[in-house]
Amino acid sequence: MAVRTNSKKGIYVSKKKTKDKYLSRMKALTKYLVTGDEYSLNVILEDKKDADKLKYRCISHLLIYPHLIGYMNEYLNHKFEFNQFDNEKWFRTIRRICSTWGISDNNQLYFAKWEKSEYDEFCKILDKYCDILNLESLNTKDKGVFFNFYESGILNDEHMNLINQTISGQESRKDKLTKGTPSATNNVFHQIQKQSVQNNTVSKYRTITDLHPRMQEICNNVTSYIKSARTHCKNCPLYGKSPVVLDSNMTQPGQADIIVYGLNPTPKDVENGIPFSNDASLLFRQYMAPLIQKYNLKYIYLNKILCATDTEKDIPKINQTFKHCSDIIGQIEKSFPHRIKIVLGEKTAKSFGIKGTMKQLNGEFIDNRIFIMYSPSSIQYNKNNLAKFEEAIDKLYGILEEEIEHRNEQQRQTEFGDDIRIDPSKIITRITNDLTLFDIQTLNEKIIYIFKNGKNQKRYVIENIKIPIYIKNGTYSQCLNVDSNMDGVCYVTAKQRQYLNKTLFSAAQKQLKV
């Protein structure tokens, strides 16, 4: 298997030995729609079967352009010969629409990059590597984590060279097993995980400067409050220690998806100004990153004790310390209402009144609101906990996926209640070029088109549902399945159509019996 390097990112991917003609035609389609290159059009039309497929690809991948959908609705959908259009005329028409609306860059097309993504190629390499070395196959979550390692630079060129050398047979498995100590043999993945914890730099972590200014203001206000001779703080055994408040991807107080709780900050957290920025936390963040990105989760990272110590052992009278911080933690929770708490570690779990050892609690979802798992530091001190940590991560993925679906359904119900509670300023009557069709919902007798503008703000077009009913005089047996010669048309609502369907079906059944 040959190996090549992506000059932009340094990823090593395997070349295909045979050229995919359909892939070449898809690339030609992209080029033609952007540039109007006639040679590319000829490549598209070489094979009618492929051209037919690409015609429908045009539709499915240009849905982000409302003006294209408008064209099809206005000029094409009502014509029965829609599927009979000559392929060349079809592609020339779509090219003209792209030109009219200024689509002049490959990246403006939804299908600009027809080549399989780097992620797909990366996963193939991992699968091949595991197969050659008889390693357990990686699941989707694991692949996402390692791709995130690659994106962040933890998985570097040296690792990729080793993997590709193994795949290409340049170094046999037997030779690799005889080199070095057992801990430094062929399992690159374990090396990556080890490096992700040990070879950290501050640049790999967020700092307080990465927070939105409003969130920085909240952190500063809480810190000032703690240092202002607050009664509970003056009586706390940690009084005088440096406080660290929270980390978040939110821009202001409001509904969050998850709050992740640790025990208390470390000196590294104090240095960076946010929690979960020490060496042990990198692995947890790497596991959470794919989920946060995939579902656009709004998160808060927080500790049950706000002041830092070097180790857990430096927290005297821990239950008393929990109580001293409880009212501040409570106020933060009120500012960021959430559905799920992710609690890391046995002592943190006890602060919520949950008893038991981590062997008993790891991966438990208590009262459908508190998920408990090993803390990142426990993995650093005991590598045997990694497998248990990953088991809990698998459960967490499933729980959060269900929660996101539940959240989306609640949003739809809230946004489109009986009285359609939408800010009137967001309801529009004209579709402009900067709008992208995002979703379509129906509510009672209304159809709601949801768009997003260039600032990612939602805009709504609300119309009454009007369904055309074409009328032809004659008996049921004289009607054709498809007939363009109609005597009239009327428009009905959705409820009227349901009633009409039942009435017509009943009438047709009677006529057929006669």
Image (cartoon, rainbow, N blue to C red):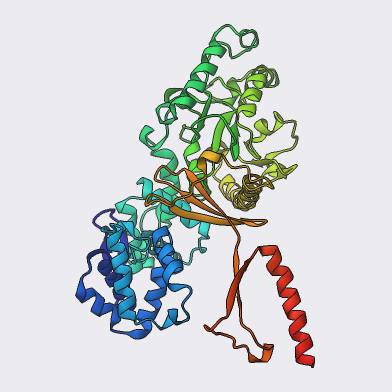
Q: For the N terminus, give its image quadrant.
A: bottom left
What residue occupies the far bottom of the structure in this picture? 514
Q: Toward which corner of the image does residue 307 lie, by quadrant? A: top right
Residue 182 shows in the view: no
Q: Toward which corner of the image does residue 346 lie, by quadrant? A: top right
Side (left or right) of 19 relative to 136: left
Give the camera-side residue of 33 and 503. Answer: 503
Give the camera-side residue of 418 and 170. Answer: 418
Give the camera-side residue of 226 and 211. Answer: 211
Residue 358 shows in the view: yes
Side (left or right) of 213 relative to 493: left
Give the camera-side residue of 66 and 52. Answer: 66
* Position in image of residue 399 (x %, y %): 64, 50
* Position in image of residue 50 (x %, y %): 36, 81
* Position in image of residue 357 (x %, y %): 71, 38
Residue 215 versus residue 1 in the image, above or below: above
Q: Toward which corner of the image does residue 440 lie, by quadrant? A: bottom right
Residue 178 versus residue 181 in the image, above or below: below
Q: For the C terminus, give its image quadrant.
A: bottom right
Identify the residue shown where x is 55% and y is 34%: 300
